[in-house]
Amino acid sequence: MRNLDLDLLRTFICVAESGGFTRAAERLHRTQSTVSQQIQRLEESTGSILLDRSNRIVVLTEEGERLLGYARRILKLNDEACDVLANNLREGVIRLGVPEDFAADVLTHVLADFSRNRPHVRLDVTSDLSARLQHAYELQELDIILVKQKVGSKKCVASWPERLCWIDSQKFPALERDPVPLVVFPLHGLYRDEMMSRLSSCGRRWRISYCSTSLASIQSAVANGLGISVLPARAVKETHRLLGPETGLVAINTIELALHCREDARTTVKQLSDCLYTLCQTLQDGCDVGWL
């Protein structure tokens, strides 16, 4: 039986989120060589290559992507146990999971207002791919989740159509290249699968040119001409060009934003769920970007 070293997992998560050893070392206040050695030790203990170091930007391998979700959950449980032993009662923690395009100013304002009115409550927010959030919720590791899912695929408190847009660069268009370069999220991301399916259905050849877990990185990669992508309307930037139906691309309208909260949840959890419902409804009413 092998045991994963928590310190090595923390370093691995930091490297994955930072996109390289240099920035991870700065965040961890360690030398780059120490960070590299820790990743090597983790790879040796797992028997897997976790990072692809062949490019300037370090990216996760398929094994690394698998481990990342587990690493976050392991450390979250570890930190939660430490909180409980330090007399931070479990009842005072609400564990929320959201997609990265929601973990921005619009959400933090709502959470800040919620916290000011309930100073005894601690919010523990996780930003990740929807599939991983859904899995953690099913394991009861999260109390509330906002996730992207296939329309009607799972029962939820409420759902809203997710307005998705095909986007290209304003300055460096990539759509006419053959094969079409794609900027994508990692494996099992809903947008990624839908993009590939739609392009194949309209007879376009494609290749993956850039892959990242970071929304900001995806937005920047498209803006700088690395390829086309699909993002929610609220994530479209001025540096992007919307690709309408005249381009031959098939609209993606099979995804919804879903709010999940258990019926037997604590009162404070249900109150936060109500706040998120109001936020999502407001965003839905005010979103007019896109051509779906």
Image: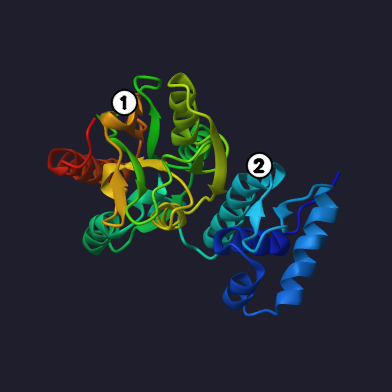
The x and y percentages for residue 281 are 18, 39
Which residue appears at 85% of the width and 55% of the height? 44
The x and y percentages for residue 216 are 42, 57
The answer to which of 260 and 170 lies nearer the viewer is 170
**In which quadrant is the N terminus drawn?**
top right
Which residue appears at 35% of the width and 37% of the height? 265
Is residue 96 visible in the rendered image? The answer is no
Is residue 222 visible in the rendered image? The answer is yes
Q: Which residue is tagged 1?
A: 253
Judged from the image, the secondary structure of the residue bearing numbered disc 2 is helix
The answer to which of 116 and 232 lies nearer the viewer is 232
Using the numbered discs, state the Cα–Cα distance from disc 2 to disc 1 in whole angstroms. Answer: 28 Å
Determine the image quadrant of residue 122.
Answer: bottom left
Answer above or below: position of 248 versus 54.
Answer: above
Which residue appears at 43% of the width and 25% of the height? 198
Judged from the image, the secondary structure of the residue bearing numbered disc 1 is loop
Which of the two marks, 2 or 1, is nearer to us in this view?
1
Colouring: rainbow
Q: Which mark is residue 192?
A: none
Q: Which residue is tagged 2?
A: 66
The x and y percentages for residue 203 are 47, 22
**In which quadrant is the C terminus drawn?**
top left
The answer to which of 235 and 240 lies nearer the viewer is 240
Determine the image quadrant of residue 10.
Answer: bottom right
Answer above or below: position of 61 versus 11.
Answer: above
